[in-house]
Image: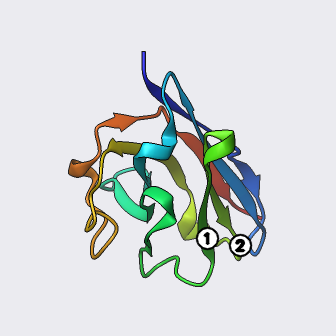
Amino acid sequence: QSQVVESGGGLVQPGGSLRLSCTASGFSLALYAIGWFRQAPGKEREGVSCINRNSASTNYADSVKGRFTIARDDAKNTVYLHMNGLKPDDTAVYFCAAIWGPHPNICTGVIDKRRFNVWGQGTQVTVSS
């Protein structure tokens, strides 16, 4: 069964850093666009970052630009989300999601969760002193 698994979440102080990983099981991530999303209690799931196949394009929500970096290592079948300068508002469950195929515009504009169809179970990120 094809699935993605997130890891790397945890408790960190404001200003700290974490690296989240999204690893595929049962398929090669190389042919997929990958999105990172997050959901805080009582809020809608929102797009955080996106990377297309071959790293052709990347995109970030305004709230994380300049602090988060998305990168993929297809040889390791993994996509990373490097998070620096973490703030309490970044506290949420973080999900990665995948969609197969060439989608040239998927990582432009608003990162739309409806366009992704393979989802992980999420990893908790808590930013608190």
Q: Which residue is mark 1?
A: 69
Residue at the image position 28 percent from the left and 65 percent from the top: 104
- Residue contact at pointers 1 and 2, CB within 8 angstroms: yes
State which quadrant residue 86 falls in.
bottom right
Residue 48: which disc?
none
Residue 84: which disc?
2
State which quadrant residue 38 falls in.
bottom left
Above or below residue 9? Residue 108 is: below
Q: Secondary structure at mark 2?
A: loop
Q: Position of residue 105 (x, y in %)?
A: 25, 68
* Front one among 24 and 89: 24
Binning the other alpha carbons within 10 Å of mark 2 as few (below 14), some (14 to 19) or many (20 upward) gives: some
Eye-nearest disc, 1 or 2 = 1
Name the amino acid, label 1.
Thr
Q: Position of residue 112 (x, y in %)?
A: 25, 59
Above or below residue 50? Residue 29 is: above
* Front one among 68 and 127: 68
Residue at the image position 48 percent from the left and 28 percent from the top: 27
Is residue 118 among the parts visible in the rendering?
yes
Q: Secondary structure at mark 1?
A: strand
Q: CA distance from mark 1 to mark 2?
A: 9 Å
Left or right of residue 72, residue 10 in this image:
right
Above or below residue 115? Residue 63 is: below
Residue at the image position 71 percent from the left and 45 percent from the top: 8
Name the amino acid, label 2.
Asn
* Front one among 3 and 55: 55
Residue pushed farthest top? 1
Q: Position of residue 44 (x, y in %)?
A: 30, 55
